Amino acid sequence: MRSVPIPVDVSKLAITCVKAPRPRVLNRDTGEIKTDKNGNTVFEVTVSVEDEFGRIELVKIATTGEPPIGVGDQVNPVGLLGYVWEIAGRWGISYRASALLPVRESADA
């Protein structure tokens, strides 16, 4: 199954970092860290996402390189895409952004 990227409109979402960025581990037994096609480390950040109706979900967002954010920071995910996956009858959505910036920095850019 080929996953088609789905752009995510974050304009009406409040996104907050709830767990500091960390390298994504591919294999817990060997400690192998995930890298992108250019060999850069892929980081994952756990965030809370609140919509305009007050519903909140926790999601992990992957990005290349360590983002300059910390716990409690409001986050602007640049180029956020969702990818639907399915394995052995289970499915979900994984998220990837080209950058995760603190809201204060993305407002200056």
Image (cartoon, rainbow, N blue to C red):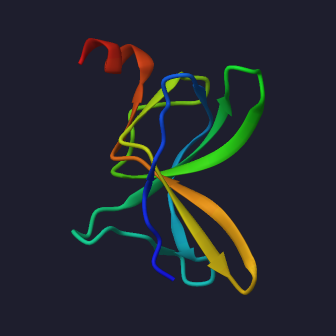
Q: Position of residue 18 (x, y in %)?
A: 66, 34
- Residue reaching furthest to the bottom: 88
Q: Which residue sits at x=23%, y=19%?
A: 109
Who is closer to the viewer here, 102 or 29? 102
Residue 76 lies, with reference to residue 29, above or below; the image says above
Would residue 12 appear left or right of 40 to someone viewing this image?
right
Q: Position of residue 55 (x, y in %)?
A: 78, 29
Q: Which residue sits at x=75%, y=21%?
A: 53
User: Quadrant location of residue 64?
Assistant: bottom left
Residue 18 lies, with reference to residue 62, above or below; the image says above
User: Quadrant location of residue 90?
Assistant: bottom right
User: Quadrant location of residue 86?
Assistant: bottom right
Who is closer to the viewer here, 2 or 65? 2
Q: Which residue sits at x=57%, y=59%?
A: 94
Q: Position of residue 42 (x, y in %)?
A: 40, 60
Residue 78 lies, with reference to residue 29, above or below; the image says above
Residue 96 lies, with reference to residue 58, above or below; the image says below
Q: Which residue sits at x=60%, y=27%?
A: 16
Who is closer to the viewer here, 85 or 20? 85
Q: Position of residue 1 (x, y in %)?
A: 51, 83
